Image (cartoon, rainbow, N blue to C red):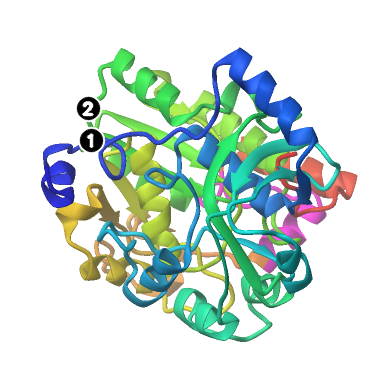
Amino acid sequence: MSLVKRVISGRGLPHGGRLIKNFVSKEGQRKSLIERARRLRQIAVPDRIVSDIEMLASGALSPLTGFMGSKDLKSVLRRMHLANGLPWTIPIILPVSAALSDEIRRGESVALTTEAGQVLAILKVAEKYGYDKSAYAQAVYRTASLEHPAVKILMDQGEVALAGPVRVIARYPYANFHEYRLDPEETRRRFAAAGWKRIVGFQTRNPVHRAHEFIQKCAMEIVDGLLLHPLVGETKSDDIPADVRMRCYEALIQNYYPQNRVLLSVNPAAMRYAGPREAIFHAIVRKNFGCTHFIVGRDHAGVGNFYGPFDAQDIFDEFDPQLLGITPLFFDNSFFCRACGNMATPKTCPHAPENRVSLSGTQVRQMLSAGQVPPAEFTRPEVAQVLIELMRTDKPVGAGAK
């Protein structure tokens, strides 16, 4: 069966037709590989690569079997598809220094470890190749400016990529969110047990405020359930810490959502801030977790002024919907309108902007720092209280999930 026929006939299946789990689950085999890994060359990888390894382990990055080779990278950068024709927009590569690359032979197996030295996986190096960082930046982030947080990371990382299949032999021992760390196999199992056939995914790296709640509930009217799927991998230094965000989600679900129609689970991925391309990537990942629909709001995965407010929606027109295999749901910026007396968007509200409750991030932070609860039209008081406690403790923001 051709790739296209397999994807079309497999509506609701993972990207490419099946979950590619790169974790060695058989205990005896895994122990043997762990022993072997101790004798191999050790390569310590940063947290964002640890997140990629975790995603490869669970099948969240299906159909990838490891880190991309040069053909796939060039195809993704130029055409936003893998070399086999399947939609894919974000490179998954393993960068190393040229000096380290010179020491590694093609065909050699190396152990990938955390920066603390914990062995996670074995990579069989099928290829090592240089890549153009400026071309990469322009293609993925639409800029080569070092003001873009991901471009800065890209320019600082190694100039050679190691490619090949990965066998994950140890899952990272995360210290938190254990009950919410559900692999694609488990989320799919829970959807089936609940009888959900149409599932909408929602990506977030921020606490959910009333505007987010509104678009989620609009989407819930046409599906069976919502996967609230916050990203808890590496984020910008000024983002709200993952544990604080999770407390906000718990409070929101407990008080304002039907318990039998929402599943809260975490996505261990690192944030790329790639705007339009990341919107496609987020949709594909949620497809692997079992979603049939995906919410794309205004300035999805954006940062600063690098992308237009609706670029992340427009990019979906560049893909064959059948090959993409997940239905995007587009929403405009939502707000509370005092004249309407409820939540709305520019598509449904005829009133002047002065009727709309809209607060900047700076205003919200100032209110929270002063112990003031923002208006109920902007955020639920239970969520605001969690954030006020954060401000009072002066907890550093930007903490990841580890």
Kindly indicate whether the residue at mark 2 contacts the one at mark 1 (C-beta within 8 angstroms). yes
Height in image: 189 above or below 290? above
Q: Which residues are magenta?
A: 362-379
327 left or right, relative to 33: left
- Determine the image quadrant of residue 23: top right
Decide: few, some or many residues near mark 2? Use Cα within 10 Å; few <14, some 14-19, many ≥20: some
Q: CA–CA distance between discs 1 and 2?
A: 9 Å
Q: Residue at x 70, y 59 (%)?
A: 104
Q: Nearer the viewer, residue 378 or 159?
A: 159
Single out the mark in the foreground, 1 or 2.
Answer: 1
Q: Which mark is residue 197?
A: 2
Q: Which residue is mark 1?
A: 12
- Determine the image quadrant of residue 196: top left
Q: Residue at x 40, y 36 (%)?
A: 20
For the residue labelled by badge 2, is the local secondary structure a helix, a strand or a loop?
Answer: loop
For the residue labelled by badge 1, is the local secondary structure a helix, a strand or a loop?
Answer: loop
